[in-house]
Amino acid sequence: MRNGIEFIVYGDYALFTDPLTKLGGEKLSYQVPTYQALKGVAESIYWKPTLLMIVDEVRVMNPIRMESKGIRPLDYGGGNTLANYTYLKSPCYQVRAHFEFNMNRPDMAYDRNENKHHNILKRSLQAGGRRDIFLGARECQAYVEPCVFGEGESFYSNYGDIHLGTMVHGINYPDETGRDQFEVRLWNPVMKDGVIKFIRPEQCTEVREIADMKPKWFNESNVESADELLAQLEVEGNP
């Protein structure tokens, strides 16, 4: 895959929150990661507004297991609330993703250097990411490493098809769609032998408008070019 990376992400817990459970204050995780959650992992490895990270597929390596925990959420009214959050236990996923240039960002045209962005992306993955990695929720710390997608045994190899019902696919932001809208996408994934192949965001037919939103403006004054980042890596001794 052009401009692609393959990595494994794992941790002790994950919480890909089903939005239907948020209203009651007791969160329940989806069985598998959403496109948006894995996109967030890829962007934590390396991201700039010049790029759009596209997640192609995910492979579920460990059995899907749940664990509930008593959580004391922040209560700004001064109460003593206790809630049960249901996490995924010992999650581990192989992910294949790639980047494309964000053509809705003409202000970033000066930074469209494909080769250098790809090299920085691969080096950032080797280093474990440029920002903290987590799976769905901030308390679910995770780690990333390069891998070969499809290598190794998955618990769901030769398991057949698992229909996962209606799930959140991801979020549309104005700088990614060209529309001044904050939107949520829905879809109906099927996991085949442990692998979920994601459709692209623009292929989602179920889109819900949430609120009006304007894109943030980026230019040379608040963003470093790929050339500057590469020079910085070479100075730091990462050729």
Image (cartoon, grey):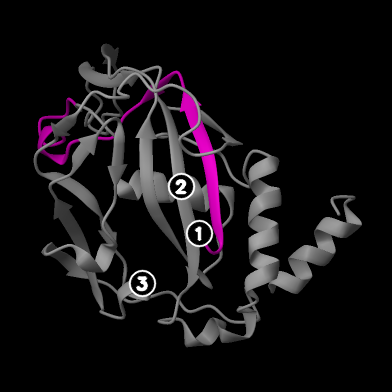
Identify the residue under disc 2: 96
Instruction: State which quadrant residue 114 falls in.
Output: bottom right
Disc 3 residue type? Glu
Which percent across, then down, holds residue 201?
27, 63
Residue sitting at x 22%, y 22%: 79
Point out the tag, 1 or 3, that comes first from the N-terminus: 1
Of circles 3 and 2, the one toward us is: 2
Above/below status of 171 relative to 88: below
Which mark is drawn over residue 230?
A: none
Label 3 element class = helix
Please check the rendered image and state whether residue 9 is part of the magenta-colored stretch, yes or no: yes
Instruction: State which quadrant residue 13 falls in.
Output: top left
Mark 3 and mark 2 in contact? Answer it, CB < 8 Å: no
Which percent across, then down, holds residue 168?
19, 47
Residue reaching furthest front?
Answer: 158
Residue 136 visible? The answer is no
Point out the tag, 2 or 1, that comes first from the N-terminus: 1
Instruction: State which quadrant residue 138 falls in.
Output: top left
Which mark is drawn over residue 1?
A: 1
> Image check: 220 left or right of 134?
right
Label 1 element class = loop
Above/below status of 73 relative to 136: above
Identify the residue under disc 3: 176
Between 24 and 100, the residue placed more toward the observer is 100
Between 148 and 48, the residue placed more toward the observer is 148
Q: Split into 4 quadrants, where in the image is the C terminus?
A: bottom right
Label 2 element class = strand
How crowded is the residue under tag 2: few (<14 C-alpha within 10 Å), some, or many (20+)? Answer: many
Which percent across, then down, holds residue 142?
50, 29
How crowded is the residue under tag 1: few (<14 C-alpha within 10 Å), some, or many (20+)? Answer: few
